[in-house]
Image (cartoon, grey):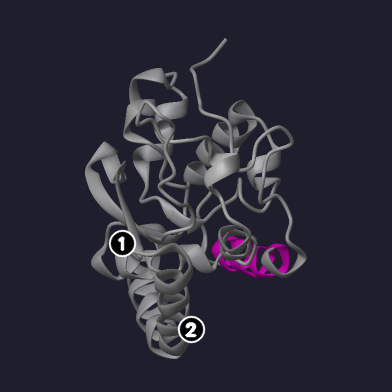
Amino acid sequence: MYRKYFKRVFDFVCSLLALIVLSPVLLITALLVRIKLGTPVIFKQKRPGLNEKIFTLYKFRTMTDQKDEQGNLLSDEVRLTKFGKMLRSTSLDELPELWNILKGDMSVVGPRPLLEKYIPLYSTEQRKRHLVRPGLTGLAQVNGRNEVSWEKKFQLDVEYTQHITFWSDIRIILQTVGNVFGGKGISSTTSATMEEFLGNA
């Protein structure tokens, strides 16, 4: 009943209240991004959502646009500044996604929205992660985030879609708050962010 009737109401109320309460934080963060990283302040990217419907994801920018002599963007490790790392470690870069939640593109809790190009690389089982709205946080995020393998992450995503309850969402939200303050799982063990998903072995 919660999943069918109340989860969207819960998402709308939570995102609206969060946007109001955190508006000073959003404004200050936007100003700092403008000063330290330039424009655009908001990073936009197409991501697959519920039933693989494509939407525009909003985040605060965390990287520069540094390119090599051939005009190709440099690696994440080079472009991710100290300020950008701070935004990611505190999850402040994710705050504009509250607007995605308010609009109905996303949920507070659900599988993280990944790149559109990953869709054909998923197994049939892994594509079940798109049976629900993607989330600001999720079961995978409170069980290792970027420190766990893609396979484990997708397993947790699908597990979440099969066991959605109000109390499980509350538990994940509380665990997320604890992880953010503890700085857990921000980066993978071999990359500044997370390795690209190249498909299943």
Residue density around tag 1, few if under 14, some if 14–19, many if 20 or more, within 10 Å: few
In-front residue for pair 80/193: 80
**Where does the image place residue 48, in percent across and percent down from the top left?**
30, 41
Residue 83, horizontal then vertical, whole percent: 59, 64
Q: Residues within 10 Å of mark 2 (few under 14, many from 20)?
A: few
Residue assigned mark 1? 40
* Separation of residues labelled 2 and 1 (CA atoms): 18 Å
Magenta segment includes 109: no
The structure residue drawn at horizontal position 65% and vertical position 36%, both measured from the top left corner, is 191
Tell me the SS state at disc 1. Answer: loop
- Residue 15, picture quadrant: bottom left
Comparing 170 with 147, the one in front is 147
Image height check: is 174 above or below 116?
below
Return the mark for residue 74: none
Seen as rendered, the residue at the extreme front is: 69
Of labels 2 and 1, earlier in sequence is 2
Q: How many marks?
A: 2
Out of 69 and 127, give the one closest to the viewer.
69
**Which numbered mark, 2 or 1, is in the foreground of this view?**
1
- Which quadrant of the figure contains the C terminus? top right
Q: Which residues are magenta?
A: 167-179
Query: Which percent across, then down, holds residue 119?
Result: 35, 27
Is the magenta region chiefly helix, strand or loop?
helix
Question: Disc 2 residue type?
Answer: Val
Is 177 left or right of 34, judged from the image as shown? Answer: right
Q: Identify the residue shown where x is 24% and y is 49%.
A: 55
Residue located beneath label 2 in the image: 25
Where residue 103 sits: x, y (%)? 24, 66
In magenta segment, residue 172: yes
Q: Decide: is 58 above or below 149.
A: below
Look at label 1 and name its amino acid. Pro
